[in-house]
Image (cartoon, rainbow, N blue to C red):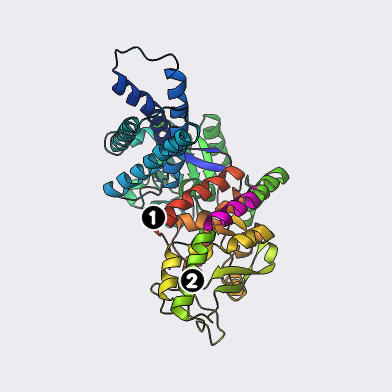
Amino acid sequence: MTFKIFQHYWQLPLALLAFLEAALLFLAPYAAHLLDVGVLAVPEANWNQSVLQQAAIFLGVTFVAMVAMGLHSSRQRSRVFGRLARIALGVVSGVLALAAVDALFSQLAVRPIILATIAAFAIVTSALIRFLFDRVLDEEVFKRKILVYGAGKRAGSIAQLRRRADRRGFHIIGYVRADGDDVSIVEKDRILGAGDSLPVLCRQHGIDEIVVAMDDRRRSFPTDQLLECRLDGVEVCDLATFFERETGKVRLDVLNPSWIIFSVGFRRGRVNGILERLFDILASIVLLAVALPFMLTAIVAIKIEDGWRASVLYRQIRVGQYGRTFAVLKLRSMREDAERDGQAKWAVQNDSRVTRVGAFIRQMRIDELPQVINVLRGEMSFVGPRPERPQFVEQLNERIPYYRERHTVKPGITGWAQLCYPYGASDKDAIEKLQYDLYYVKNHSLIFYLAILVQTVEVIIWGKGAR
């Protein structure tokens, strides 16, 4: 089951997990102090105020750190050790924040033994509640019961969703054949009786939602039946909206211009744009100050490897908002003669053109840091579709429908596609990434922008998608 807040879909099980985990994180300082003084002991007069401050700081920092580690993402696929490592990093971030505030202001009165107890309580309870959610909780309670009207090619695309993350929000009860459908695609035992009307099937099976996925809507569209179902409280949606909600991307194979025109989204609020620009400027200044030592170290390393006369900064023409071109700035990670024939080439896995220093700074995303200057200039934003080279854009515009639409927002250093899909190096990858880019363009908001920015931390720490 999903719901939409701030132009983004959220899954109810993950929202419930986040709420319970936040409550346990808030209680961690209280539990630590009670264990320290004894449950039956009488606390000091200012005990409650001091612990409340500790709880607020620890909850705020730890929860944001856990989101940054991808622990509240439906696409988190790490195993037990990976999740424990992410939980530990999040908790340690909160404990360090408590220690830092105490050292700066000396008002929290938090001793090392208290910090250790807070960390132990938070790690154990977070790991336990996640284990219970994975092993004990019946997820069917949170799933919509779906009836698919259609049993052909378009309906079969729903059955092809194999990943657990993509099927977390729904359970398919069955399919209803529509005129013109090729029923050889969907399993015959999943096709419900043709003699029953949609309202009857919905009442028999307790259907929550009907997904209209017929191959040809021009043939006997069941308007009256769908109207009756809708008045009975059954939700009705089309296939493109269903995929957008459940997979976090806009599927090109089921998309049509009318859906883009009439669907909710694609808003460009002036206030949202001003706030985002202000954040870009402030964050750029802070990031430049913090990242300067790393950039200088990378520059020295490049000089040592390639010689003191070797170029360090790499300028490359990219396509930005509304198709305008600009020179993107990066630290050079490939040989200077990487494209000596003048032809633009995709980067590939274990690319021989990448230097040893380049491989490291690519893995840690240090080569991207000079793009902060592009953000300050207003050519890029921190979050948005990755800017591509004009040669690739020209080719992809001809081969991929709706590719131009990704340029209606500013390109970004990171983005929704970078979180959801690995590095793209082919037309097929470009199609997959475009579907996530269109989702971001459609559901663009400041909250979604900030959420992507926070979750990028996991990509950097675990080196996802780097080549």
Q: Crowding near pointer 1: few (<14 within 10 Å), some, many (20+)?
A: few
Region rendered in magenta: 279-291
| SS for dot 1 | loop
Query: Which disc is residue 187 wearing?
Result: none
Q: Amino acid at mark 1?
A: Gln
Q: Earlier in the sequence, mark 1 or mark 2?
A: 1
Q: Is residue 217 left or right of residue 56?
A: right
Residue position marked by numbered label 2 in the rendering: 300
Residue 402 visible in this rendered orientation of the protein:
yes
| SS for dot 2 | helix
| Residue 34 part of the magenta segment | no
Q: Give how far apart the Cα atoms at labels 1 and 2 are.
A: 50 Å
- Most common SS among magenta residues: helix
Residue position marked by numbered label 1 in the rendering: 160
Query: 415 or 25, which is in the foreground?
Result: 25
Quadrant (top left/top right/bottom left/bottom right) for the N terminus: top left
* Residue under the image location 64 percent in, 62 percent down: 374
Q: Crowding near pointer 2: few (<14 within 10 Å), some, many (20+)?
A: few
Quadrant (top left/top right/bottom left/bottom right) for the C terminus: bottom left
